[in-house]
Amino acid sequence: MSQAEIVFAIIVGIISALGVVGGAVLTAYAGDRAAKLALKGVERQIALNYAVKMAEFRQLWINDLRDAMAGFHSVAILPGSLDKREFFRLGTKIELLMNRNDPRYPQLDECMYDFLTAESREEKWSCNAPFVTICQDILKTEWEVLKTELASANLPHLKD
C-alpha cells in the first residue's frame, strides 16, 4: 500500500470515527431534550391534577356552605316554629365553614343572631333580605375564586 493510500485510509477512518462520535452526541442530545420535554409534560399534568382536585374540594365546601345557609334560613325564618337545636347546629356549621377573617363574617354573624332575637313575623321577615344578600355575596365570591383558580390552571410558571 502506498503512503497516499495509508493517509487516505487514516483520514477516512478519522472521518468515520468523528461521524460515529457526532451521531452519538446528537442522539444523546435528542434523548436529553426528549426526556426534558417528557418531564415538563408530567410536571404540567401533576400541577393540573392538583388544581382540579383543589377545585373539587372548594366546590364541595361551597355546596356544603350553601346547604347550611339554606337550612339555617328555613329554620330561622318562620316565627313560632324555631327549632333552637337545629338553629344552633346549622348556625355553628356556617360559622365553622366560614373563614372568620373574611371581611363579611361579622355581617353574616350579625344577620344570623338577628334571626334569634326576632320574635314577630315582621321582625323575622326584616332579617330575610340582609341574610340572603350576604349569603349570595359570599357564595358568589367563592365561586369566582374557584373559576379563577381553574382558569389559572394552565400553569404559566411551567411554560417554556
Image (tube, rainbow, N blue to C red):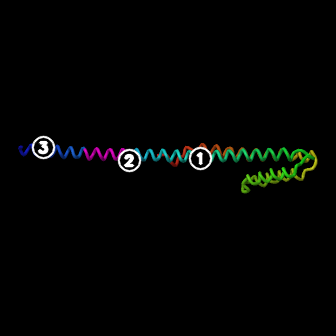
Residue type pointed to by label 1: Ala
> Does the segment drawn in magenta span residue 30?
yes
Please indicate whether residue 150 sits to the left or right of residue 158 in the image: right
Q: Earlier in the sequence, mark 3 or mark 2?
A: 3
Q: Compare residues 131 and 6 and report the one nearer the observer.
A: 6
Dot 2, crowdedness within 10 Å: few (<14), some or many (≥20)?
A: few
Residue type pointed to by label 3: Phe
Q: Are marks 2 and 1 in contact (CB under 8 Å)?
A: no
Please indicate whether residue 12 sits to the left or right of residue 119 in the image: left
Residue type pointed to by label 2: Asp
Q: Which residues are magenta?
A: 20-31
Q: Compare residues 29 and 46 and report the one nearer the observer.
A: 46
The image position of residue 141, as x and y in percent, is 70, 46
Query: Mark 1 falls on what kind of element?
Result: helix
User: Which picture quadrant has residue 78?
Assistant: top right
Q: Residue at x 9, y 43 (%)?
A: 5
Residue at which label 3 appears = 8
The image position of residue 28, as x and y in percent, is 34, 47
The image position of residue 117, as x and y in percent, is 89, 53
Q: Earlier in the sequence, mark 1 or mark 3?
A: 3
- What is the chief secondary structure element of the magenta stretch? helix
Residue at which label 1 appears = 51
Please indicate whether residue 100 sits to the left or right of residue 148 in the image: right
The CA span between labels 1 and 3 is 64 Å
Q: Residue at x 58, y 48 (%)?
A: 50
Query: Mark 3 falls on what kind of element?
Result: helix
Q: Residue at x 81, y 45 (%)?
A: 71
Quarter placement of the N terminus: top left
> Does the segment drawn in magenta span residue 152?
no
Residue at which label 2 appears = 32
* Number of the label disc, if any, that sits on residue 15: none
The CA span between labels 3 and 2 is 36 Å
